[in-house]
Image (tube, rainbow, N blue to C red):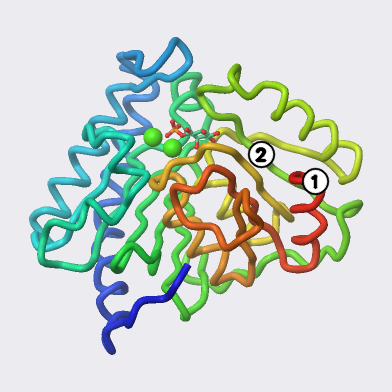
Amino acid sequence: MQEPILPYNYKQEIYNRLNSVESILPELKRILLELQEENLEIQYKSSDVDIVTKADFYSEQTILHFLQSKFPQDQILSEESGIQEAIIKNLSSINTKESKYTWCIDPLDGTVNYAHKLPLFSISFGILYENFPIGGLVFIPAFNDIYRAVYNDGAYKNHKPIRISNHKNLKQSLIVTGFPYNKIQIIDLLTNTIKKVLSNTRGLRRTGSAALDLCWVAEGRFDGHYEWNLSPWDTCAGTVIVKEAGGVITNEKKQEYTPGDSLLIASNPYIHQSLVNLILD
Ligand code: IPD
Ligand code: CA
Ligand code: CA
């Protein structure tokens, strides 16, 4: 993706936003952990497996309210607030306000885990400048882990630098994947790919939160992540974090990944080509 001409003070602008967002994380954590135990209120979206809970809406409302008061000029794209898929796929058409900064928010990534009382879920705050991912923060409440990155300024976990793994070949690599809600429509693609990945790597995992997967690639726990049909709010923050940690991310055309593309393959640079060829050839 083509880098836009960035303002001289863009790092300061992004740090200002990420630092600000950190102040609401303790409150989001408290409420999400509380609601998970007491009050799920599950509703169904596109199908029986595509669910949303009271916590998704609560988290989103808290975040939107905060961002609208702190950064009223910024645009916001957030999962549960009803923006149509057509618009999401073409990020450029959401540019209606004056600011060139757009927040891309997943208020609860890993809702199925959350509803089953598993601790693997996250909140993802991506920031785009003219549709170019430029900053990200992913918070994992159950572990109190905050992953952050600013374009050209490195990636950090709890304010300490992180780096991608250095496994040099697929046989040593641990890969993570995820499955979209329309999994039945592409079941052959998913299962054929699983066969190939299981046969050629150390193992394959599925955590249930794509933003968390990307952070765990960035810090070298996983060597690679691939997944079809992710949405921009799943990947905006995580892609900046992976790239700033030294990773590479490509799409179904073997070109650089842009949020909204139908396939994401993220990994350390050493295994990237082999992983891409394994999945796509
Ligand atoms: C889901 C998670 C999951 C991925 C799904 C996503 P949600 O997001 O990121 O890991 O496999 O495709 O939709 O619905 O829990 O926000
Ligand atoms: Ca998500
Ligand atoms: Ca979500």
Inspect the image, locate mark 1, and give the three-letter code of the amino acid beneath it.
Asp
Residue 49 horizontal/vertical position (percent): 48, 15
Of residues 170 and 183, the one nearer the viewer is 183
Residue 200 horizontal/vertical position (percent): 90, 44
Inspect the image, locate mark 2, and give the three-letter code of the amino acid beneath it.
Thr
Residue 66 horizontal/vertical position (percent): 15, 51
Residue 281 is tagged as: 1
Q: Is residue 267 above or below residue 195?
A: below
Residue 177 is tagged as: 2
On the rendered structure, is 280 left or right of 149? right
On the rendered structure, is 275 left or right of 261? right
Q: Is mark 2 within 8 Å of ligand 1?
A: yes
Which residue is at 83% across, 63% downward? 167
Which residue is at 42% across, 51% downward? 139
Q: Is residue 253 above or below residue 240?
A: above
Which residue is at 17% across, 54% downward? 67
**Viewer-nearest of discs 1 and 2:** 1
Residue 51 horizontal/vertical position (percent): 40, 19
For the residues labelled 1 and 2, the Cα–Cα distance comes to 18 Å
Q: Is residue 200 above or below residue 237?
A: above
Q: Secondary structure at mark 2?
A: strand
On the rendered structure, is 147 left or right of 225? left
Of residues 226 and 146, the one nearer the viewer is 226
